[in-house]
Amino acid sequence: QSALTQPPSASGSPGQSVTISCTGTSSDIGGYNYVSWYQQHPGKAPKLLIYEVNERPSGVPNRFSGSKSGNTASLTVSGLQAGDEADYYCSSYAGSNNVVFGGGTKLTVL
Amino acid sequence: QLQLQESGPGLVKPSETLSLTCTVSGGSISSSSYYWGWIRQPPGKGLEWIGSVYYSGTTFYKPSLKSRVTISADPSKDQFSLKLNSVTAADTAVFYCARLTFGGVIDPWGQGTLVTVSS
């Protein structure tokens, strides 16, 4: 059960779009449509942004969207805002009620 | 709304057992639709799922931690607990408790509690 692979950093200017990738294997991302994304601001608990690949919980702006192709999932943040600057983590169901996380991506709004 | 709150010692000595409790309010852990779990985050590092428990007591652990972890549930108190034994400095982390769905969706999270392993 290895961690999912995310780029350590990503950046974009206000108003732009940025996409963060999350690569796993056929035992996690590729095997289930249970990919989630979390946003974490410094000193705060993570917040659920996306679940089941592309579903948004109530209250999450539609500027956040998710997708998946094969063993790789992606989070796209459109119309970047200063408040989007945070760490983003992907996770996937990995069978037998196990969960695996990505290493996290620090998003900087330039 | 559902809220979770971690409690326990903030300092544990090496080789001893780390013990934390999560108290759930605004709902019940006896729901058949959810698991209850622990996630940790070493300072400056990423998230790591430790394990989960169903209200009936069925547990699931991260394979690499399984030999040191025990998670239990007390539905009568709407609490669940984590024990991690033989701790070292590498176990220093913020520990979060959370509710999980069967697909591993984690929401909501507790605020987290920092546990430092040091003599």
Image: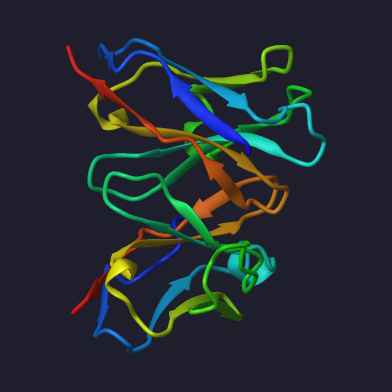
- Image point 33% across, 89% down: which residue? A16
Determine the image quadrant of residue B17: top left
**Above/below status of A69 relative to B21:** below
**Above/below status of B115 relative to A72:** above
Check the picture and name the quadrant holding the C terminus of chain B: top left
Label tally:
0
- Image point 43% across, 18% down: which residue? B7
Residue located farthest toward the right when viewing the structure as drawn: B32
Q: Left or right: A5 with respect to A110?
A: right
Check the picture and name the quadrant holding the N terminus of chain B: top right
Residue B81 visible in the current orientation: yes
- Image point 28% across, 44% down: which residue? A43
The residue nearer to you, when weighing A49 against A67, is A49
Q: Left or right: B46 with respect to A26?
A: left
- Image point 19% across, 17% down: which residue? B118
Residue A1 visible in the current orientation: no
Measuring from the top left, give residue B85's x and y in whole percent.
Answer: 42, 16
| Coloration mode | rainbow
Measuring from the top left, give residue B36's x and y in whole percent.
Answer: 63, 34
Measuring from the top left, give residue A7's x and y in whole percent.
Answer: 32, 72
Measuring from the top left, give residue A90's x and y in whole percent.
Answer: 47, 62
**Above/below status of A28 relative to A7:** above
Determine the image quadrant of residue B29: top right
Q: Left or right: B78 with respect to B113?
A: right
